[in-house]
Amino acid sequence: MKRLVILGAGYGGLALAQKLVSLSKGHNSWKVTLVDHRDYHLIQVRIHEVAANSIPAAQIKIPLSELLQGHKVESIQAKVIKIDPVGRTVETTSGSISYDRLVVALGSVTDFHNIPGLQEHAFAMKTLDEAILYRKAVVEAFRKATAAGAEPLRKNDPRLTFTIIGGGLTGTELAGEMVDFCNDLCKKFPTARNAYRIVLAELTPHLLPELGAENGDYAMNDLRRKNVAILTNSGIDQVLPGSVHLINGKTIKSNIICWTGGVKAPPLVKESGFETTRDGRIEVNHNLRSKQFESVYAIGDNAFIHDGRTGKPVPQTGQYAELQAAYLAKCFAHEQPGVTPEPYTPFSMGISISLGRGEALSLSGPLKLTGMPGRVVKDLSYTKHELGVRNVLPEVRLG
Ligand SMILES: Cc1cc2nc3c(=O)[nH]c(=O)nc-3n(C[C@H](O)[C@H](O)[C@H](O)COP(=O)(O)OP(=O)(O)OC[C@H]3O[C@@H](n4cnc5c(N)ncnc54)[C@H](O)[C@@H]3O)c2cc1C
């Protein structure tokens, strides 16, 4: 039996392990090993909701033991340290693992782009711990600013100014959720009396630059109506304790700063000898196979591939990661010597961007839903993912 090792039990890696085992039922052609340093699957796309206290952290952690129960998958909880793509081994904190095929699905880490002071003085929004830290810091800011003996709050007081840098998907969603969170905190700490300010700074002329000007402007107008200060064309020069300095010379005085402006593949990918894109991704061919090492594949945030129809790189989203996993599962399950599988075709069912607890902008082809109907679509996408990882379908249960 050949050994397939999958690195990462996130949106791509977990789906691949579950789907491949389900499709190979009865064939037993692959021994599947899934490696992750966590013992749970993180619903990554909802961490900003934890940060803004919209949902509890426990809601987005699903134990892998539950999700893999009944699946013939060897699950190893270990941190991947290095890959040896020539010797076909992976070095982990629990020892070395050899493979016949490897799928790299390690997701991404925050990229601070070497902006002076950013990493030191800003929160990031990529891990659950970071989301929880941010949530605590926001509550603490309200508590301190309204404590007995505290100086009265002024207009645009840095103590209650929450700056989010990066107006892409994560930053825009966080800004919307923060409005609701801060409104709740104004009730809990009444002397704050709406004295908070949320600032969202974006480098390009529009929010959500990957979704086009019209959608970005919709999100901008919606957030502005909720008193979020949006600064476009606002690159960051440096961050100091309590202030963000923009390239255009302006300064935002703000005690709580969050960076949502960039991700990159974990550095270990490049350090393992892969030729990568600037953001550390592995360039793959139309079968999601590394162009450099035949036995290695990459999916999700770790894969770099162009969409032949648009000429643009395939976006790094959970949905693409899952669909790439489904494609690879089929390729591996139906593999025949000397036969090249059909090429991978990027496909998207659409995207939803939350703009607060009760609303979202949902886009699917020419369809656009906003407000509560948009939010219903967003929530359905969460439910679909959760049902998918929890059940797959009854017939794929093996145990
Ligand atoms: C706040 C936020 C909101 C988002 N919203 C959306 C959205 O609305 N829709 C959407 O489609 N996408 C969204 N995304 C993007 C989406 O989360 C990612 O594109 C998706 O999770 C990528 O899937 P993946 O399998 O490549 O990586 P991940 O899902 O991140 O999984 C990577 C796995 O690798 C593991 N891992 C990492 N390093 C190591 C190591 N060294 N050793 C062992 N294990 C390791 C991690 O623990 C993790 O389980 C959002 C992202 C963020 C941060």
Image (cartoon, rainbow, N blue to C red):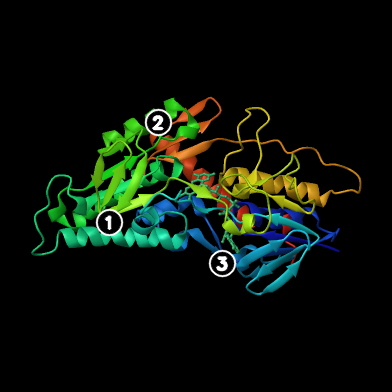
Q: Is residue 32 above or below residue 186?
A: below
In which quarter of the view is residue 122 placed?
A: bottom left
Q: What residue is rendered at 61% in x and 38% in y?
A: 314
Q: What residue is rendered at 68% in x and 30% in y?
A: 308
The kind of residue tagged 3 is Arg
Please identify, in this view, whether the residue under mark 1 or under mark 2 is nearer the observer: 1
CA distance separating discs 1 and 3: 32 Å
CA distance separating discs 3 and 2: 36 Å
Please identify, in this view, whether the residue under mark 1 or under mark 3 is nearer the observer: 1
Residue bearing the label numbered 2:
206
Q: Position of residue 245 (x, y in %)?
A: 29, 45
Residue bearing the label numbered 1:
241
From the viewer's side, name the closer residue of 117 and 34: 117
**The residue carrying mark 2 has its beta carbon less than 8 Å from ligand 1:** no
Q: What residue is rendered at 65% in x and 33% in y?
A: 307
| Quadrant in the picture for the N terminus | bottom right
Is residue 8 found left or right of 188 in the rendered image?
right
**The residue carrying mark 3 has its beta carbon less than 8 Å from ligand 1:** yes
Please identify, in this view, whether the residue under mark 3 or under mark 2 is nearer the observer: 2
| Quadrant in the picture for the C terminus | bottom right
Residue bearing the label numbered 3:
38
State which tag comes first along the sequence, 1 or 3: 3
State which tag comes first along the sequence, 1 or 2: 2
Q: Position of residue 158 (x, y in %)?
A: 20, 51
Q: Is residue 250 above or below residue 264?
A: above
State which tag comes first along the sequence, 3 or 2: 3
The kind of residue tagged 2 is His
Q: Secondary structure at mark 3?
A: loop
The kind of residue tagged 1 is Pro
